[in-house]
Image (cartoon, rainbow, N blue to C red):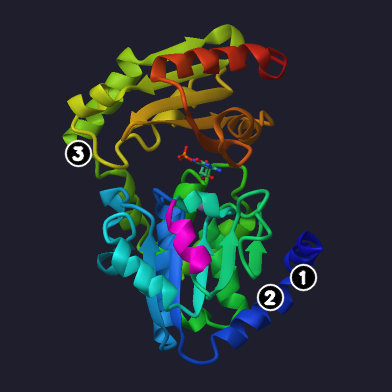
Amino acid sequence: MFPIVFLFLFLRPMKEKISEIKDLLQNPKDIVITVHRGPDADALGSALALSEVLKQLNHNVTVISPNDYASFLYWMKGNDQVVIYSEDKEKAQKITNNADLIFLLDFNSLSRISDYSDVVENSSAIRIIIDHHQEVDTKAANIIISDPKSCSTAQLLFEVIENLEYKHLINKDVAESLYAGIMTDTGSFKYSSTTSKTHHIIAELINLGADNSKIHDLIYDNYSENRTKLLGYCLNDKLQIFPELNSAIISLTEEELKKFNFKKGDTEGVVNYALAIKGIIFAVFIAEKEGVVKLSLRSKGDFKVNKIAKQYFSGGGHMNASGGISELSVNKTIEKVISIFKENKKNLTK
Ligand code: 5GP
Ligand code: MN
């Protein structure tokens, strides 16, 4: 019985969901906005943009991130007020318990917020998901706005804000946070998820005050010396290419990361260098962080890395960009990945 009810709620028309959200926002509420663990620019930018819009409507809004994130996102408006659950559990718990509404942005299942999920589930707040990942867990929220075709949660959120008739509340700060989300999730407008609609929305964000060149600079041209040297080490010493399987691996152990004084975000994008090599259609980045072996999977064309992430690494994501974790050591994980390459030889070499 229950799954059918949830499926029905999920399948309701967008218009109905928007008017329900609008009703919920009619009078001032205590609102929490949360994002997946290790939020990227799309997750954090969407959360801070929505927060700035809702604050202008006199809601009491708190953005809660399950853990800390890369410092190249700290420029976003509202960053200084984000509560980090892993660093201040008591405060995050109190605010979440007290919330009327919880927005869950850029993730499709409560497992993506780790142990903060217990706190969210124990709160009586109404939950609203806005997300662009496939296979959203229809039981995770009361209202679900999910569009896996959307290049980013930030683009989808822009459309939600427009449909709620709050577009006049998109000021320069909101526009810049949304711009950052769309720019990074489209690989600077190059992935196939980038459409003419994306460019129209980007044009609107620039008209609303987003300084596009400045944002690019803040996110991409802001490497520390250590990050640049770590990238050099990855490419020169740690890149393994399997030309007969059109695949590549880059891996790092915790000791190697320590040598380069690793900071959150320092390995973001490294996997793309492996994928940029001529002929490579499947690239895997493996790194041991805080005792956990994490994988980033990227592909070109119709090779579905989300299937691999789900089947072998308790993960998921998008068709061409996914992630997961491994229970094995870095070396054993490399062996496992090589055997996955071999198993998929037919699809990798067709
Ligand atoms: P990244 O490789 O940049 O960490 O993640 C790429 C994409 O994979 C993310 O946008 C997210 O959708 C997905 N992803 C990353 N890690 C996980 C994970 O542990 N579980 C799931 N379900 N998806 C993940
Ligand atoms: Mn995203």
- Mark 2 against mark 3, which lies toward the viewer? 2
The answer to whether marks 1 and 2 mark residues whose Cβ atoms lie closer than 8 Å is yes
Mark 1 or mark 2: name the one nearer the start of the chain.
1
The answer to whether residue 178 is visible is no
For disc 2, the neighbor class at 10 Å (few under 14, some 14 to 19, many from 20) is: some
Q: Main secondary structure of the magenta part?
A: helix
User: In this image, 31 relative to 318: left or right?
Assistant: left
Magenta run includes residue 275:
no
The residue at which mark 2 appears reads as 17
- Mark 1 against mark 3, which lies toward the viewer? 1
Label 2 to label 3: alpha-carbon separation: 44 Å
Mark 1 or mark 3: name the one nearer the start of the chain.
1
Magenta run includes residue 120:
yes
Amino acid at pointer 1: Arg
The residue at which mark 3 appears reads as 224
Query: Residue 339: x percent and y percent?
Result: 58, 12
* Secondary element type, mark 1: loop
User: In this image, 230 relative to 102: left or right?
Assistant: left
The residue at which mark 1 appears reads as 12
Q: In which quadrant will I find the N terminus?
A: bottom right
Rendered residue at 30%/69% (across/down): 91
Query: Residue 230: x percent and y percent?
Result: 26, 26
Rendered residue at 63%/11% (across/down): 342
Q: In which quadrant will I find the C terminus?
A: top right
For disc 3, the neighbor class at 10 Å (few under 14, some 14 to 19, many from 20) is: few
Which region is colored magenta? 115-122
